[in-house]
Image: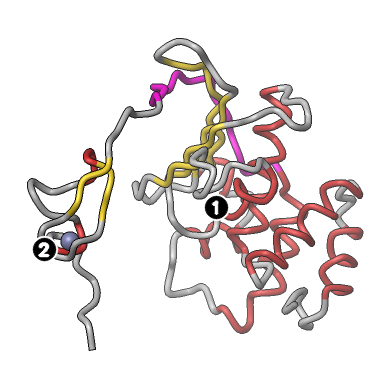
Amino acid sequence: MQSGQDGSSEALAAAMKRSGISSPLMEQIVRLSAFHTSPAPGILIGAFMVDWALELLGARPGTKLYGVCETPKCLPDALQVMAHCTTGNNRLRVVPIGKFAITLNAPSETESAEAVRVFVDLGKLKKYPTIDTWYANSPSYDKHAMKGKLQEEIFRAGRAILSSERVRVAVTKKKQWKSVTCPCCGETVPDYLAEGDTCGACGSMRYYERI
Ligand SMILES: [Zn+2]
């Protein structure tokens, strides 16, 4: 695993220890970094976000949770590893809004659920100039020279750059569906995913051609 500032997982652990991060969270961050294949800044911030959201929800281990992520970058992995909301179990939704924010909620029998939303708070970033520069994608952020400082600031800040709010999210119920055969390729798809008569691969979602 590519890891801390000098490329080792020991360096990552040492940097976290210096900042007084709790052992359980340190373990999560190591697991998350391995899953993501690097301790990217967004992954580290994401770990603090999910950790806080879980605490705010008072989620017991094993509770099925539903997560929404407002960016496809880094954050989905934090929800997948730490809250077990995955693309495959259909409890993770990625909305490409482009904000570093997540919501998390417990199951609900009604049409909506109370959720917690945790987001990077721009006002709070001012105290952490390296994170602020990186987050703004500013040309003055020099990845090579500032990577270590950025990681140290992220660990030092922890939740201090985040804010949270209570929100309500819509609950999507499982759809009833039947299988339909595409006349174009002969393969089947659920009816609600068909595009008129054809499947998506023969329509707007075509992404390969046979060779
Ligand atoms: Zn087809």
Residue 80 included in the magenta stretch of the image: no
Query: Residue 144's x, y, as percent?
Result: 61, 84
Q: Main secondary structure of the magenta part?
A: strand
Rendering quadrant holding ligand 1: bottom left
Residue beneath label 2, please? 184
Query: Is the C-beta of the residue carrying label 1 under 8 Å from the nearest atom of ligand 1?
Result: no
Bounds of the magenta segment: 159-173
Q: Which mark is residue 75?
A: 1
* 73 left or right of 45 in image: left
Identify the element where label 1 is drawn: helix
- What is the C-alpha distance between the residues marked 1 and 2? 38 Å
In x, y percent, where is residue 11? 85, 74
**Of circles 1 and 2, which is in front?**
2
Quarter the N terminus occupies: bottom right
CB-based contact (under 8 Å), mark 1 and mark 2: no
User: Up-down: is 178 above or below 209?
Assistant: above
Q: Which amino acid does label 2 sit on?
A: Cys
x%, y% of residue 163? 58, 33
Residue at (64%, 52%) from the top-left corner? 45
| Disc 2 Cβ-to-ligand 1 distance below 8 Å | yes
